[in-house]
Image: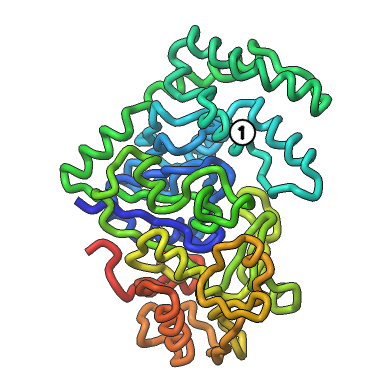
């Protein structure tokens, strides 16, 4: 009865889609349990590259049932754009399931996200402006609109009226924007109802029954641990629970049914948006990693901030998530480097910290303490066995494993779906 969770173990963009794809035909369900279309997975299948934003990456694997669970906020326009684009490329999307309890991103959420971020000026969080935060805020404030509400027009109108009552005052009096009418929101939302209806299910019930049948269910986290609303670099975080604990609350599957927790880490580190980033590079090394790793957002196209591998971050995320296995991605991006620094600790006001400081102020001012490793200076993209890697590449992986708190079970050596070295089975 394996329930397997995949989470990002840095600040996102680690290559979670590749790990999902690795498990491939052994998985029966792939579940997106948090976030919305504010992040993306890029999956390469043969010569085809797919950029997914809202849909679980498992939708590309024949025979897998993809599920958008209750912890997700759904932009219906994005949902159907992605489905239509995949269908046009010959991908079967007929098995998609959507939780009746998932919340919906509306036009007013997107509007508020953009104007609020601009209003913050220098204190901007760095959101994508896609309405994710305002939709989650409405959920917590109990004025959100859920998927199931679209099938009762009277209830839907009451909820839209209630939500717009306060929001229009903000738009008019604070942000100097026009009011949004109830009718325009109703017209937009109801236009999706009939297309949506066949996909909507009691996702918690279906997933629990699948686990009881002994099927393999993979829970695919959006964003990453360091962007988690509780455990990330608050307030420079996302609005949802991006850790393994979020898989339970975001899907309706109990924690004792989650058997394997897989953390995804890059062989270096990236993040987008504002917030502390101790190993960030502003020199030629940073430019090299960004260009060689093509570090630009799947969803936004924004250049990512880049830095060296941060072992204290990996230990922290291993502990928070209960990581049983790491998947190390993009090792090949380091192929040409003569030496590779790794952050092993921090210095804050002359004091060494071997773990992530609990104080956000200390973390913001943390200076990385590096240990340097010799590079391998050769192309490893065609290698499929760990023992065939150059000695310096093996030593680098083993050093990261020792520092990071969990075993490294697979290593990505290229963008292709088969460009991976498996050291330990991720299911058995």
Q: Can residue 315 be seen in this view?
A: yes
Please tell me which residue is depicted at 54% across the width and 58% down the height of the picture.
226
Seen from the viewer's position, the closer of residues 111 and 44 is 111
Tell which of 358 and 45 is nearer to you.
358
72 is higher (above) or lower (below) than 393: above
Examine the image and state in which quarter residue 359 appears.
Answer: bottom right
Residue 178 located left or right of residue 416: right
205 in relation to 154, above or below: below
Q: Residue at x 50, y 60 (%)?
A: 47
Indicate the position of residue 423 as horizontal and vertical percent values: 32, 76
Q: Residue at x 30, y 35 (%)?
A: 204
Where in the figure is residue 278, as x and y percent of width and height? 64, 70
Colouring:
rainbow
At mark 1, the secondary structure is helix
Residue bearing mark 1: 134
Residue extending farthest to the left is 213
Q: Residue 221 or 78: which is nearer the viewer? A: 221
- Give the residue at x 41% y 50%: 220
Extreme residue toward the right, this view: 176
Q: In the rendered view, does 286 fall on the left or right side of 322? A: right
Q: Residue 228, how many percent across, how many down? A: 52, 51
Dot 1: few (<14), some (14–19), or many (≥20) neighbours within 10 Å?
Answer: many
Number of marks present in the image shown = 1
Horizontally, residue 389 falls left or right of residue 266, namely left
Residue 333 at least partly seen: no
Q: Looking at the rendering, in which quadrant would you find the C terminus?
A: bottom left
x, y percent for residue 334: 57, 80
Residue 372 sits above or below residue 346 on the image: below
Q: Which residue lies furthest to the top in this view?
A: 154
Please tell me in which quadrant of the rendered image residue 352 appears.
bottom right
| In the rendered image, the vertical position of residue 88 relative to residue 400, given as above or below | above
């Amino acid at each position: 009865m394996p329930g397997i969770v995949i989470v990002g173990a840095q600040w996102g963009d680690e290559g979670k889609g590749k790990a999902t794809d690795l498990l491939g035909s052994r998985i029966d369900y792939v579940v997106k349990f948090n976030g919305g279309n504010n992040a993306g997975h890029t999956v390469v299948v043969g010569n085809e590259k797919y950029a997914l934003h809202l849909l679980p990456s498992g939708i590309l694997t024949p025979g897998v049932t993809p599920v958008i669970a209750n912890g997700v906020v759904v932009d219906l326009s994005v949902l159907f754009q992605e489905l239509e684009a995949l269908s046009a490329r010959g991908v079967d999307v007929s098995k998609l399931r959507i939780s009746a309890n998932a919340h919906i991103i509306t036009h007013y959420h997107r509007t508020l996200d953009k104007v609020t971020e601009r209003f913050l000026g220098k204190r901007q969080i760095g959101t994508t402006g896609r309405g994710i935060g305002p939709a989650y805020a409405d959920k917590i404030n109990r004025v959100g609109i859920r998927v199931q509400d679209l099938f009762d027009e009277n209830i839907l109108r009451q909820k839209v009226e209630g939500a717009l009552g306060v929001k229009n005052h903000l738009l008019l009096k604070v942000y100097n924007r026009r009011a949004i009418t109830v009718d325009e929101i109703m017209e937009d939302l109801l236009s999706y109802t009939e297309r949506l209806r066949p996909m909507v299910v009691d996702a918690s019930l279906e997933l629990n029954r699948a686990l009881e049948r002994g099927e393999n269910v993979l829970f695919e986290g959006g964003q990453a641990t360091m962007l988690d609303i509780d455990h990330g670099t608050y307030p420079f975080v996302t609005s949802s629970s991006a850790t393994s604990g979020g898989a339970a609350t975001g899907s309706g599957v109990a924690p004792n049914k989650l058997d394997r927790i897989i953390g995804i880490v890059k062989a270096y580190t990236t993040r987008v948006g504002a917030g502390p980033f101790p190993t960030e590079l502003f020199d030629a090394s940073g430019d090299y990693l960004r260009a060689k790793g093509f570090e630009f957002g799947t969803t936004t196209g924004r250049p990512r901030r880049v830095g060296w591998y941060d072992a204290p971050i990996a230990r922290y995320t291993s502990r928070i998530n209960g990581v049983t296995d790491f998947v190390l991605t993009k090792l090949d991006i380091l192929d040409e480097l003569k030496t590779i620094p790794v952050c092993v600790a921090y210095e804050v006001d002359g004091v060494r910290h071997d773990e992530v400081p609990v104080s956000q102020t200390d973390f913001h001012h943390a200076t990385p303490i590096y240990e340097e490793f010799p590079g391998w200076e050769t192309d490893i993209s065609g290698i499929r066995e760990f023992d065939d890697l150059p000695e310096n590449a093996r030593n680098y992986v083993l050093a990261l494993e020792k520092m990071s708190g969990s075993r490294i079970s697979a290593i990505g050596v290229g963008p292709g779906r088969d460009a991976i070295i498996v050291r330990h089975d991720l299911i058995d």
